[in-house]
Amino acid sequence: LYDAGAIAVALDRPRDAETAWGRLRKEFSDHPLTARASLEQAEAAFSKKNFKDAAALGRAASKSPEDAVRGEALLVIGESEMKLQHPAQALPAFQAAADTPGLEPALHFRALAGTGLAHENQKQWAQAAKYYEEVAEKSPDKTLAAWAKARRAAIAANLKPAPKAAKKR
């Protein structure tokens, strides 16, 4: 069923792929290929800006026993929830993705950047700055590092302590 779905994708027959992978999810819900198919569908839904479906399919894929699939699925969930303007739901997904063992460095730093962005959207400036600094300093992706540096600079004014009110005499 997994292969049938993959062949249908290659033949540009999305309905057939959905049918095969839907049956795979129904009949073999705990199989590792089911999670992999759900991840592929989540990524496809995300690319079509269907963020609600991407998040739902990502949740199905996040149950994978494979670290790589689980980590990528969590990242899709986080990014989808951010697109849906749900930073509180995105934050735990990004954090879990960043904590997934063996996640590719590029994906690990995307998860850290997403964590910073979710904190920023919730006006948690210090936490956002911490994640942005880590990405800016350590990410092997120069574009992502530059983005994190720019985000850190953009929130800098919010990190300064409020001026103390003048004491009344």
Image: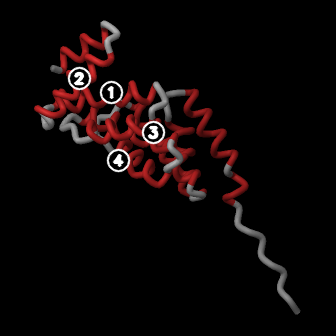
Q: Do labels 3 and 2 touch, CB within 8 Å? A: no
Name the kind of residue labelled 2 in the image.
Answer: Thr
| Sequence-earlier tag: 3 or 4 | 3
Q: Nearer the viewer, mark 1 or mark 2?
A: 2
Along the line of sight, which residue is nearer the eye, 18 or 124?
Answer: 18
The residue sitting at 19% across, 30% down in the picture is 34
Horizontally, residue 120 falls left or right of residue 12, namely right
Q: CA distance from mark 3 to mark 2?
A: 23 Å
Q: Which residue is mark 1?
A: 41
Query: Can you name the residue that lies furthest to the bottom here?
Result: 169
Q: Quadrant of residue 28?
A: top left
Mark 2 Cα-neighbour bin, 10 Å: few <14, some 14–19, many ≥20: some
Which badge, 2 or 4, is on the more N-terminal residue? 2
Sequence-earlier tag: 3 or 2: 2
C-alpha gap between disc 3 and disc 4: 15 Å
What's the amino acid at mark 3? Ser
For the N terminus, the image quarter is top left
Determine which residue is flagged by label 3: 80
Residue underneath mark 4: 96
Would you name the residue on which mark 2 appears?
Answer: 19
| Residue 14: percent from left, percent from top | 33, 17
Q: Is disc 1 placed on a helix, strand or loop?
A: helix
Q: Residue at x 16, y 28 (%)?
A: 24
How many C-alpha atoms fall within 10 Å of the one at disc 4: few (<14), some, or many (≥20)? some
